[in-house]
């Protein structure tokens, strides 16, 4: 960019004022505070908004400062800059064959008021819908947007990088029970007997489930979060928070059971991070399954798995949107997933000390 500025200075008749230490050749206009760049730019018809990188979408305050000051930016940087600005609002260096051609056009603009002002017409017209859709998020202060992003990251919510807003999860972050007492959302819960399922021709049969509450609801209470499996052989409690469903299973007597979880995730492959952490993932959602013991999970259909239950255990299901922004995330936990995994295996403990 310095080479381009030097060519404009030395090989053309265009007046170029370089006010900073780099290539300085002029003093700032009188009565202007150099610490206020916007005020300085207001004194000029053009601003050479030259970036230090030539990468798509890399656009800095050099361009936006020109717009804020009301001057006309002469831009050199991101090749796709026109995708980011209102139509006919910027002079792009790449549109000219040489610095000399560029200088010739800029001099012409100084002599043709109507042509020069045509580059400012966008200021007096309804905002370009394309521009508004891309940068409407700037109406919200950056501090607020940062807080929203941190909240989304912490609680496993999707973050829309284009509009810088939280996206609703494709699978709602709530845990609901049906009238029998079993979970119906974000997955469907089934309890089966494992007795004889390894024998040829035999399949698992559903076992009896009872609950003290016959209400279908998404509001869990101390009464309706508990069900008894197979006449009290197992006791299951369900807890939920922020896209996490915890099943606490207490075994009263020996016996083999299967917990089948049917999810809405369109996946036939169960990714295995380790013996206790696995997940289903499709193009939109991920559901991660944590087990407190080393068990062999089996897939029985699309988005459906079975967990053998032979003793008291805990199962956690984490529901979140897929992270499409970062690369290589299919095989690694998200920040939220990792946080909830560590919380499951190494929960914070509280002790009461008597003195």
Image (cartoon, rainbow, N blue to C red):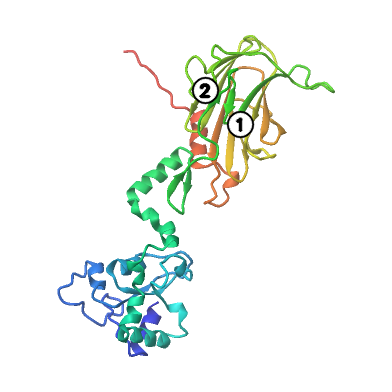
Seen in the picture, residue 261 relative to 101 is either above or below; the reply is above
Locate residue 343, reporting x and y percent: 48, 30
Residue at image coords 27%, 75%: 21
Count neighbours of disc 2 (C-alpha within 10 A) and say few if under 14, some if 14 to 19, many if 20 or more: some
Residue with the mark numbered 2: 217
Locate residue 89, reporting x and y percent: 38, 72
Residue 178 falls in image quadrant: top right
Seen in the picture, residue 26 relative to 164 is either above or below; the reply is below
Residue with the mark numbered 1: 276
Task: Name the side, left or right, on which 286 lies relative to 43.
Answer: right
Count neighbours of disc 1 (C-alpha within 10 A) and say few if under 14, some if 14 to 19, many if 20 or more: some
> Under tag 2, what secondary structure?
loop
Residue at image coords 69%, 36%: 302
Task: Name the side, left or right, on which 345 lies relative to 50.
Answer: right
Is residue 61 visible in the rendered image? The answer is yes
**Image quarter in which the C terminus is found:** top left
> Under tag 1, what secondary structure?
loop
Q: Residue furthest front?
A: 125
Residue at image coords 40%, 70%: 52
């Amino acid at each position: 960019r310095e080479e381009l500025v030097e060519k404009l200075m030395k090989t053309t008749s265009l007046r170029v004022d370089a006010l900073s230490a780099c290539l300085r050749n002029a003093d700032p206009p009188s009565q202007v505070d150099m610490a206020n760049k916007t005020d300085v730019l207001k004194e000029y018809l053009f601003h050479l908004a030259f970036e230090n990188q030539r990468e798509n979408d890399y656009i800095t305050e050099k361009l936006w400062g020109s717009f804020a000051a009301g001057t006309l930016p002469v831009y050199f940087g991101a090749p796709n800059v026109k995708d980011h600005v209102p139509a006919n609002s910027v002079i792009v260096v790449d549109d000219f064959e040489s610095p000399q051609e560029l200088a010739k056009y800029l001099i012409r603009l100084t002599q043709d008021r109507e042509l020069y002002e045509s580059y400012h017409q966008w200021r007096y017209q309804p905002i370009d819908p394309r521009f508004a859709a891309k940068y409407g998020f700037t109406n919200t202060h950056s501090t607020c947007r940062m807080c929203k992003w941190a909240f989304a990251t912490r609680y496993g919510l999707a973050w829309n990088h284009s509009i810088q807003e939280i996206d609703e999860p494709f699978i709602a972050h709530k845990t609901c029970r049906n009238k029998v007492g079993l979970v119906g959302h974000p997955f469907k819960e089934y309890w089966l007997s494992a007795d004889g399922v390894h024998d040829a021709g035999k399949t698992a049969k559903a076992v009896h489930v009872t609950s003290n509450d016959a209400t279908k609801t998404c509001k869990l209470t101390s009464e309706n979060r508990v069900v008894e499996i197979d006449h009290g052989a197992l006791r299951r409690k369900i807890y939920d928070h922020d896209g996490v469903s915890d099943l606490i299973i207490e075994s009263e007597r020996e016996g083999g059971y299967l917990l089948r979880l049917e999810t809405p995730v369109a996946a036939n492959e169960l990714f295995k991070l380790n013996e206790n952490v696995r997940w289903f993932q499709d193009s939109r959602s991920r559901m991660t399954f944590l087990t407190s013991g080393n068990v062999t999970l089996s897939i029985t259909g699309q988005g459906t798995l079975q967990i053998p239950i032979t003793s008291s255990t805990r199962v956690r299901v984490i529901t979140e949107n897929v992270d499409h922004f970062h690369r290589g995330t299919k095989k690694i936990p998200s920040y939220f997933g990792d946080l909830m995994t560590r919380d499951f295996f190494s929960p914070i403990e509280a002790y009461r000390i008597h003195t």
